[in-house]
Image: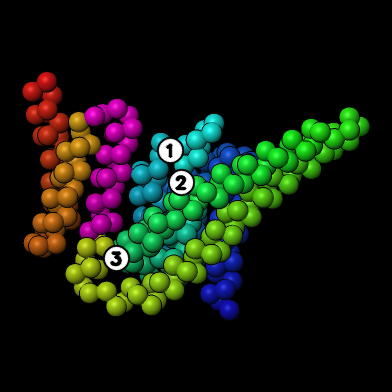
């Protein structure tokens, strides 16, 4: 019963935060850096939410749902990943289980894009129907259409979280502990290096065309060395950043 209530609470929070993306408010509480810690706080492990929210914020920072562009729903991703990590390991979400949760929720990107597109299409029909009503009833019809649209947006995020979180928790309970220690260490390193990948993605979207390529190369090399040779994570991060900086400078010099 506790698990059911926790999943329901996460789904309700996901639905409310999802409204902030485009439907109402837009106070930025739907951003992963806020949505992740809020979900973790609700479940009693805010630190896991900070890690997940911070990583996803870097990755999805510049993918904004403006105009007809429909990006992956980072809010649902942050809420779901945090819920899976915390509920899947009640004693405290470790870096390996956080990495496992992030990988699970990464696969739902196309699902969230499809759900957002479907809801947008349905809501556009609501306003068309309201506009076609008689002049006397038009104002009330438009108000009902707006309220109905808010309900639909809430239910979209609510249902996604209500389905993804328990499925992810089941995957953690049934599969994660059976993975070998090498995979657990790789998942921990994956989480530590994801911020560098996020920074590279931001650099790329800001037209910094050289730095991100070499950062990604450094990421791959560091990941391999981190698995083969046990070294402190700080050294791995410094290696990645240095590789990106040297590569960018070398490319600029050649140009």
Mark 1 highlights which residue? 63
Left or right: 111, with 201 as reference point: right
> Which quarter of the figure has residue 208?
top left
Q: How is the image coloured?
A: rainbow
Q: Is residue 37 visible?
A: no
Q: Which residue is mark 3?
A: 96
Q: Where is mark 2, residue-wise?
A: 72
Look at the image and say whether residue 195 sits in the magenta stretch: yes
Mark 3 vs mark 2, CA separation in Å: 24 Å
Provide residue 244's location: percent of width, then percent of height: 16, 38
C-alpha gap between disc 1 and disc 2: 8 Å
**What range of the chain is rendered magenta?**
189-209
Look at 53% across and 60% down and name the residue there. Answer: 161
Label 2, residues with CA under 10 Å away: few <14, some 14-19, many ≥20: many
Q: Give me the C-alpha separation between circle 1 and circle 3.
A: 27 Å
Label pair 1/2, CB-CB below 8 angstroms: yes
Of pointers 3 and 2, the one earlier in the residue sequence = 2
Q: Earlier in the sequence, mark 1 or mark 2?
A: 1
């Amino acid at each position: 019963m506790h698990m059911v209530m926790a999943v329901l609470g996460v789904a309700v929070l996901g639905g409310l935060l999802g409204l902030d993306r485009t439907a109402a408010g837009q106070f930025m509480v739907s951003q992963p850096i806020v949505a992740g810690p809020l979900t973790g706080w609700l479940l009693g492990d805010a630190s896991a939410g900070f890690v997940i929210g911070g990583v996803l914020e870097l990755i999805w920072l510049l993918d904004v749902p403006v105009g007809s562009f429909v990006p992956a729903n980072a809010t649902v991703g942050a809420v779901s990943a945090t819920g899976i990590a915390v509920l899947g390991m009640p004693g405290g979400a470790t870096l390996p289980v956080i990495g496992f949760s992030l990988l699970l929720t990464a696969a739902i990107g196309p699902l969230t894009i499809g759900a957002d597109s479907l809801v947008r299409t349905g809501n556009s029909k609501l306003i068309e129907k309201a506009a076609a009503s008689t002049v006397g009833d038009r104002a009330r019809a438009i108000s009902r259409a707006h309220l109905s649209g808010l309900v639909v947006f809430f239910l979209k995020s609510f249902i996604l979280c209500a389905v993804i979180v328990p499925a992810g928790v089941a995957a953690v309970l049934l599969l994660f502990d059976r993975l070998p220690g090498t995979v657990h260490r790789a998942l921990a390193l994956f989480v530590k290096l994801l911020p560098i990948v996020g920074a590279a993605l931001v650099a790329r979207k800001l037209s910094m065309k050289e730095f991100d390529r070499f950062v990604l190369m450094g990421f791959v090399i560091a990941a391999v060395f981190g698995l083969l040779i046990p070294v402190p994570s700080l050294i791995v991060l410094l290696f990645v950043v240095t590789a990106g900086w040297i590569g960018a400078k070398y490319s600029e010099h050649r140009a």
